[in-house]
Amino acid sequence: MRPKLTDVAEKAGCSPTTVSRVINNYGYISQKTRDRVYAAMRELNYQPNTLARSLQGKQTKMIGVIMPSITNPFFAELVAAIEDKLEADGYKMLLCDVGQDSDKERRYLRMLEANQVDGIIAGSHNLGIEEYQRHGLPIVSFDRDLSDQVPIVTSDNYQGGCLATQALVNAGCGHVYFVGNLVKTGNPTSRRFDGYADTVAAAGLTVHTARSAFYESPAAKARELRELLTSGRKIDGVFCSDDLTAILLLKEARKLGIRVPEDLKIVGFDGTQLVQNYVPELATVVQPVPDLAGTLVKLLYERIADPEKKLAQNSYLLPVKLLRNQTV
């Protein structure tokens, strides 16, 4: 039997009215009381708005979107494309920028559940968040394995890693480095690295890696890249796991008098319109942002219409393409 609001009130030691006010964020409620109510809701796995909508047959026409950082051009363009599609269909978007803060993401997830959104598109970089395992709202994931019940939409990161690395090999590179995030399960960078590693191995070359974390400051990244370029290692090709890192590498190489592409060839990843317009010389793997946004929204609508319907597939892999420019 599904828990009721009165069950939450009893476990939290307060009145049903107080629980309702906490859920709807109405009136003054002490933080201590809010914490007790949220703890009771989590323990009972109480999902108020899903239940309310099922009884009332109503939708709020609000969609929650959880992303890691909209200061990153790729996520900014993806969010803009999602919002355009939602707006065209009469929906509004609540954007949650969670960075690398798991607790912040949990708070946002509870807020979205309590504020009557019809569904959630989740693309955060925080892994192992147990709330996704027992969600009560329709959820679609971008690029993250959240739960067996949550469909995943992603670019073909493995194909992108292969395309980028093969372009460097074909251009004559014999010492190809992968520069990117530390590899971890569930992170798309791991699949980009896998494509790189397999392509390098197939060419009879050696795998070389250098760290460049997603959330590091540009100054810290530039310092690490400069150290790599001045380390004395043989490096004639670099596949960067994102375009911003590739741009920094290009900048540091030019400062050191390293000619690109004569001495060093570089390929990035993401291929946003911003990068194509402002750094048109950069070779990059282009993610299909409009198609990603369209697939995410379409799948979420299907989940909203029938949350219990078994999907034809749980993973949706969209092809990428190599934009071959002057740096390779």
Image: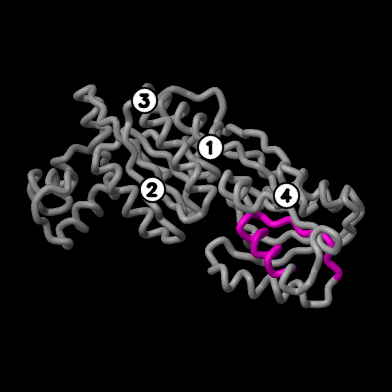
Query: Given this view, does label 3 or label 1 mark the residue nearer the observer?
Result: 3
SS at mark 3 in the image: loop
Label whose residue precedes the other's in the sequence (3 or 1): 3
123 on left or right of 238? left
Q: In the image, what residue occupies the spot 37% across and 50% down?
A: 96
Question: Do callouts 3 and 2 mark residues in contact (Cβ within 8 Å)?
Answer: no
Q: For the residue marked with disc 1, what is the amino acid?
A: Ile
Mark 1 surroundings: few (<14), some (14-19) or many (≥20) residues within 10 A: many
Question: To which residue does mark 1 refer?
Answer: 152
Q: For the residue marked with disc 2, what is the amino acid?
A: Glu
From this view, report whether residue 178 is shown above or below residue 285.
Answer: below
Label whose residue precedes the other's in the sequence (3 or 4): 3
Question: To which residue does mark 2 refer?
Answer: 131
199 on left or right of 154? right
Q: In the image, what residue occupies the spot 36% across and 35% down?
A: 119
Query: Given this view, does label 3 or label 2 mark the residue nearer the observer?
Result: 3
| Range drawn in magenta | 234-253
Q: For the residue marked with disc 4, what is the amino acid?
A: Ala
The reply to whether the magenta stretch includes residue 246 is yes
The reply to whether the magenta stretch includes residue 228 is no
Distance, label 3 to label 2, CA atoms, is: 28 Å
